[in-house]
Amino acid sequence: MTTRPLDHASSVCLGIETSCDETAASVVRGRATVLSSIVSSQMVHAEYGGVVPELAARAHMQAIVPVIEAALSASGVSWSELSLVAVTSTPGLMGALLVGLPFAKALCYSLGIPFVGVNHIEGHIFALRLEHPELEPPFLAAVLSGGHTELLVVEDWCRYHMLGSTIDDACGEAFDKVAKLLGLPYPGGAEVEKLSREGRESIEFPVPDAGGFDFSFSGLKTAVLYHRRDHPDTPRADVAASFQRAAVRAVTGRIEQAVRKTGYRKVGVSGGVAANGYLRERLTELAQRHEFRLLVPRPAYCTDNAAMIAAAGAERFARFGPSSLDLPAAARTPLA
Ligand code: KG4
Ligand code: ZN
């Protein structure tokens, strides 16, 4: 395979994301100029109350060609102008990863351009760069998604030091499970937020503490379950608002602790849960109190998208060159 020399500043990277239930493609120029970002969310899972892996894989197969074509067309870039393809290779649902990854490899092979596999969590970190192109490490980062809850130091781009992660449920997973307990549709995070606006934070749910910089959300979810059982007449909106306060406190508490301990003055928060307006308000207050710079992407870059994968892939390629065409998909791979 021939590889074209890639000047980072003017590279044009196609990003592809199929790790869970969003089929996404995006064209990004240079480090972080998003020319297009198309996200097709799979509706097929709603009736099951959670992602069904086999259905996700099939839906990705149906959507991948139209989504990539739409991203190319919206960007105004032609196939021959692409210099690189970046794709999520880990972590995620195996059947879902096995749609985007081989597709990206075949595309690169046929176009004669390099391919880079990207860790999805690293993608969420690069969402911060999409929103703040001038951002430079080191900084603290929290990735709060449906599958992951990580608190880490970004020492340099592509170099991370993990501080803590969840020992049980992910933060977004807790929102989804509580949504289900409250009879709200899947995915539940945004639904819980919406219902919370009508409720009072009247219940003192325990703020989970897993020790150190780790997180734990399963006890909180169980507390909500028991509360529903023992107090069925409490308005659902009050339960939602009280849960949301406890979950957000768990996050802001850990971030506060990390800021104090490490002294970093920049903190990035990304992943689907970072789209939550209540969390964003509490983080803004925390940033004012501790005088650090808070970086949060716009909601469309918090939830799964391929622009973040393209941005991460472009940086990885500039630093480490292409991935091998025999790079396997992996359901789990720690970032650091
Ligand atoms: O990052 P993401 O799109 O996908 C994963 O990598 O998992 O995150 C999805 C998660 C889901 O659990 C969803 O319920 C949650 O993010 N989420 C929210 C909100 N929007 C999405 N959680 C709380 N409030 C929201 N507004
Ligand atoms: Zn994600």
Image (cartoon, grey):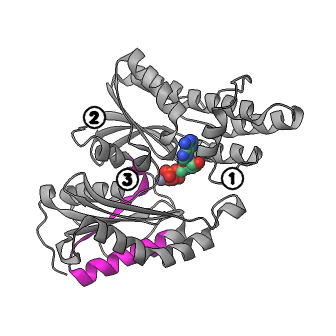
**SS state under label 2:** loop
Residue beneath disc 2:
138
Measure the alpha-carbon separation of dots 2 and 3: 17 Å
**SS state under label 1:** loop
Q: Position of residue 129 (x, y in %)?
A: 29, 44
Q: Mark 1 Cα within 10 Å, few/some/many (few <14, many 20+)? A: some
Tell me the amino acid under the disc marked 1.
Answer: Pro
Observer-side mark, 2 or 1, equals 1
- Range covered by the magenta-colored residues: 97-124
Q: Position of residue 286 (x, y in %)?
A: 45, 21
Q: Name the residue furthest top.
A: 289
User: Mark 2 vs ligand 2: CB under 8 Å?
Assistant: no
Residue beneath disc 3:
123
Q: Mark 3 Cα within 10 Å, few/some/many (few <14, many 20+)? A: many
Q: Position of 170 compared to 308: left or right?
A: right
Q: Residue at x 71, y 36 (%)?
A: 219
Q: Is residue 325 magenta?
A: no
Q: Earlier in the sequence, mark 2 or mark 3?
A: 3
Residue beneath disc 1:
185
User: Mark 1 vs ligand 1: CB under 8 Å?
Assistant: no
Q: Residue at x 33, y 48 (%)?
A: 126
Q: Position of 182 compared to 128: left or right?
A: right
Q: Name the residue furthest bottom.
A: 110
When the figure is inspected, residue 225 is found, relative to residue 60, above or below; the finding is above
Q: Earlier in the sequence, mark 3 or mark 1?
A: 3
| Quarter of the image with the N terminus in it | bottom left
Tell me the amino acid under the disc marked 3.
Answer: Gly
